[in-house]
Image (cartoon, grey):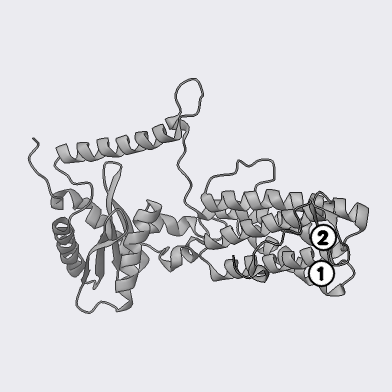
Amino acid sequence: MGDAEMSIYTTNGDKGTTNLVRTKNVSKSDDRIQLVGTIDELTSHLGLIKTMMDRAEDIHFIEGIQKNLNTIVSGVADPFNREFKTEDDQTGQLEDEINRLDGLFSCPKEGNILPGSSRLSAELDIARAVARRAERDLAAVSVKFGADNGAKKYMNRLSDYLYIMARYTETTEQPVQNQEESRPSGGKEAEPVAAVQTTATSEAVIQEVLKRMGIQGRITLDSAKRLIDKIEQEAARRGKKAVIAVCGPDGNPIAVHVMDGAFLVSFDVATKKAYTAVAVKMSTKELSVLAQPGGTFYGVDKMDGGRIVIFGGGVPLKVGDTIIGGLGISGGTGEEDHSLAEYGLSVLNEVLDRKSVV
């Protein structure tokens, strides 16, 4: 069986009791143990949230919260140890971040929200709910045993921070698909498997229609080359030296062309513009307006590992409402690049692969 000292279990809690630093045989139903368990649950939720974040600053901030929560837990177990007190500057950091986020967008009042518009915002709302429960548990401990006032203040601000962070995330994350259309008449929820089948069937129908029209569901390499040729000719006519990039609907590059004399940086920018256009399903010129301070997508360029760009020159390539790829152009001003991209859209139908309808 191995050395007993190495076992992950001790059997000490088999009778429903545990120990605190200065108190032995405490019932696991004790308010202090309940509080420790709730904070442990909250810290675990925050760990999941970290794995879903892109910005290093956000991840670092969440880690700081986890460390502060560990200090609060230590203070519950050893309330007379001043090393485990929560300082005002720790609460101040939360307040500063709340104020920063509040200045970036118009935050809706609590009670006027429906959580779940994106995966990350939903996880933040779960953490917020657990934080409020932890705050209530801390209040119960305070009545019976006393508690650090700094910790009580910190827990109150923490739930406020998680609330506004969830709302801000809703403005920058891609929303989850609305399931209303998949519900059968009578208001009953559709079965999960049925919803998946419906989505798969719809996609199959779209692809079959495109096939019968003689158009593939994604732009081909040959079509991308023909599109690039036409745009290059137009760019040369305008006296522009550009990089022209075409990607598939999955955002992966299909073809990239560098005109003689184009800037080195334009290669990276053009491919990112094409990617952005399919990622957000709009032109990068439209996105640039929405990404201004106070806009719906403010801060989006800091997400997705820096692959999102917010200046003109990227457009989604569509057949009807179906995106078959993305086009990105870089070499001039945002307006000049967007104008060339619009020219590309105007000649798209001329370059697409088409076959005889069977």
Question: Residue at image x 30%, y 35%?
Answer: 201
Q: Quadrant of the C terminus?
A: top left
| Badge 1 amino acid | Asp
Circle 2 residue: 153
Q: Is 294 displayed left or right of 311 in the figure?
A: right
Instruction: Say whether residue 269 is visible.
Output: yes
Residue 138 circle label:
none
Q: Secondary structure at mark 1?
A: helix
Of pointers 1 and 2, the one earlier in the residue sequence: 1
Q: Residues within 10 Å of mark 1 (few under 14, many from 20)?
A: few
Residue 119 rendering spot, x and y as whole percentages: 52, 50
Q: Secondary structure at mark 2?
A: helix
Farthest front residue? 1
| Front residue of 291 and 336 | 291
Q: Residues within 10 Å of mark 2 (few under 14, many from 20)?
A: some
Cα separation, mark 1 vs mark 2, equals 9 Å
Q: Is 13 displayed left or right of 332 in the figure?
A: right
Residue 207 rendering spot, x and y as whole percentages: 23, 40
Question: Residue at image x 40%, y 64%?
Answer: 311
Label 2 near label 1: C-beta < 8 Å? yes
Instruction: Say whether residue 107 is visible.
Output: no
Residue 53 rendering spot, x and y as whole percentages: 53, 62
Q: Quadrant of the N terminus?
A: bottom right
Question: Residue at image x 31%, y 55%?
Answer: 250
Circle 1 residue: 88
Question: Residue at image x 37%, y 62%?
Answer: 312
